[in-house]
Amino acid sequence: MSTTQERAAAQKRFALAKSGLDTVDERFASSKWLVSALDKIFPDHWSFMVGEIAMDSLIILIATGIYLALFYVPSSTDVVYAPTSGHVYLPLVGQHMSEAYQSVINLSFDVRFGLIMRQAHHWAALIFLAAVFFHMCRIFFTGAFRKPREINWIIGLALWQIVSLEGFTGYSLPDDLLSGTGIRVIYSIVQSIPLVGTWLAYALWGGRFPGSTFIPRLFVIHEFLFPLAIVGLLTAHLMILWHQKHTDFPGPGKTETNIRGSRVWPQYAMKAGGLMMLTASVTFLLAGFVQINPVWLYGPYTTYTVSAGSQPDWYLGWLDGSVRLWPHWEFRSFGHEIPNPFFPGLLIPSILFGIMFAWPWIDKWIYKDYGPHNLLDRPRDKPFRTGVGVAAGMFFTDLTLACATDLLANNLHVPFERLIEVLQYGVFVGPIAGFVVAYWTCLHLQRTDAHPIRRPVGGIIYRTASGGYHTVGDVHHDDHGHDDGHGDHGHGGPHSDTPGGQSPRHDAPTPEPVAGD
Amino acid sequence: MLRGPVLLLSLVVVVFSVLILTQAPARSASNTVSTNPSDIAAGAVLFEVHCQSCHGYQGKGGVVAGAPALVNVGAAAADFYLTTGRMPLNSPSNEALRHHPAFTDAQIQELDAYVNALPQITGQGTAGPTIPSPEPLCSVDQQKSPTSVDLATQDPGCVTLSEGQQLYAVNCAQCHQAAGSGGMLSGGNVIPTLHNSNLIQAYEAPLIGPKPMPIFSQLSHAQLSAIAQYVQYLKKPSNPGGFGISGFGPVAEGFFGILVGFVLLWFASRMIGNRG
């Protein structure tokens, strides 16, 4: 990037924009920075783009959210839904409801573009969290959190937490039956905090549940506090990324000190811009064609009603599942009871998050590797870390399934209690089984160098010093084929070594490369 | 070139039209239980063949554990269990779930008549609730300008969806779900979806309390009518926003958002980015 040739090429590319750069220079004297910024290299691997889906979803969320905020009324004031000149939803006529719920009903039925904006906002939130989750998994499994990127891992985790809470506050704003049920659960969990719980709940709700101050407060939190935190942390996240430069997978010509890929302008900007447009398309197609959260069917929230099948949105399902699976134990000491929801609702997530925040340092300790890394690990080369990640994924999946027990029981025709029992065992069995299978698979993949999913075609043929040939990662072994235990060709992991240098071991068993596991 | 598909499409349209037009008409509005002796006699024959082995001679029960006496249950119970296909059961230990009715409408009316006449035949007690005639829905204009009537005590002659929605939310939604999608009780007892029920069945269920559902004896005729009308509305609600995901609720939405929305974008990034 710094060679004269490349510099000349860059100048040539920007020749067309010369007058534009001059305009910038005359005012800000920053065209040099701009050119180098536009010349910045981003790696091309597809998995790096998934984080951008999250960023694009955030942009959609902000845009649609601004539109919704124009019509939403953050008020718990009791009103009677009465026919207006516009559309009227008959089954609610004459009913008492909060002004907030009424404004969401009117937003959905009476405001131009209101319903599609609301649905796009909700679908974008679901996709946002899925992208965040995938992005986090990529960082974890490839070891991208290692020095010097530990701080960005922490910022990323904080973003995940705030984004989840932001999703929950948004889910709670319409004040329909589902929202109110969710807030009621959270109120109980806040109350269950030892010593301070009751006071804290009173302070947050401004009195007893449901109160009339919580909806306006929720609105401020959803509208200002969390969005500002998200945008601020995301800016830091991206600035650190920009400054530290991207990680990349090992490969030909890739080293710890260089980056290979596309320049921001024009290649990467086109890719990222295209993905942004696709994200918007998919979100709005879903918003237009698939209904989400029909608040009019749930009806207004009253404290004495609840609907079957009340769950949070998917990304908080694991917390709901945690509460559902926790046994009915009670702990009393010194005349105080620690209420039951405290353990599954707060303690377990805190422990989990604690481990996740500390993972970069746990990882250093496990691998005795304290140096900086810009090249990524292949997941198979770090079987223990991959195993831990898969175990965490199994834990998360088990709790998420527990959140859906009422639907699962109904659709699978399994008694509810049996399902809870199975999932209670699953909390332990799932992660252990996941760890073992992942660990074993990693070792196997290291040996065979097979692609984890695709069936291997062809292979790499090595000629040994004695004149024999052997292939690596090939299903069609001939009689001379054998395996020296390592097939890594230059991936730089701790288990890699050069296969050609090994002496042939004809008596070594030939492992079958696995396709499909 | 298009002759084949056009012919095929026409054929499909014709077949479907014939099927729809020749379908048996919905049951007539008259819900009166026959007291005609010939109907009762025909019902008795059917009862002896299909019901007596569990419910006992003249429905007096005591034959099989769990099969109740039917002498005083009334025509509404017989009508509900038979029109929803819950009875007859293959085995008394089976859970009574909705099936295609085992009998024709005429046979069901004869069995209703027989069960209704059982107190007279056996000389024991009085008949339970008869087949209901739910109040109709008020006109749209009436529903738009509601006059507050206490449904618990007064019978306004017509009911509104709003009344139905409120009563449904309080009495039914915690098991049958806000949109009537059903659910699951403890002990593996299925809570059925309400989208298959007709107006009379939706009224009869809270009236007679098919196990394990309780009898909602606190509800008046007008209140039961309002609930039944709202349940009918839930089958095809005024429901904008596109394709409603079956089951409604955040779990279905989450699955859809991830498996369709996110996976599409995931593939897009795979196609835009490089591999390996």
Image: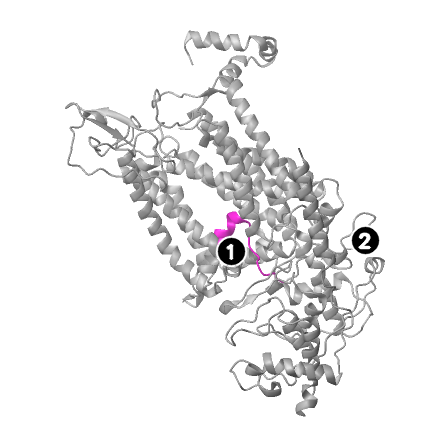
Q: Quadrant of the C terminus of chain A?
A: top left
Residue located at (60% from left, 46% from top): A170
On residue A404, the disc is 1
The amino acid sitting under disc 1 is Ala
Residue at 60% over, 66% down = B99
A95 lies above or below A462: below
Secondary element under disc 2, as helix, strand or loop, is loop
Residue B234 pos. (x, y %): 69, 58
- In reply to whether residue A450 is colored magenta, the answer given is no
Q: In this figure, which residue is indicated by the disc labeled 2?
A: A83
Identify the amino acid type marked 2: Pro
Q: How is the image coloured?
A: one colour
Q: How many numbered discs?
A: 2
Question: Can I make out residue A315 in this image?
Answer: yes
Image quarter where the N terminus of chain A lies is top left
- Is residue A313 magenta-colored? yes
The answer to whether one can see residue A304 in this image is no
Q: Is residue A476 left or right of residue B271?
A: left
Front position in the image: B258 or A29: B258
Q: Which residues are magenta?
A: A305-320
Q: Residue under mark 1: which chain is it in?
A: A
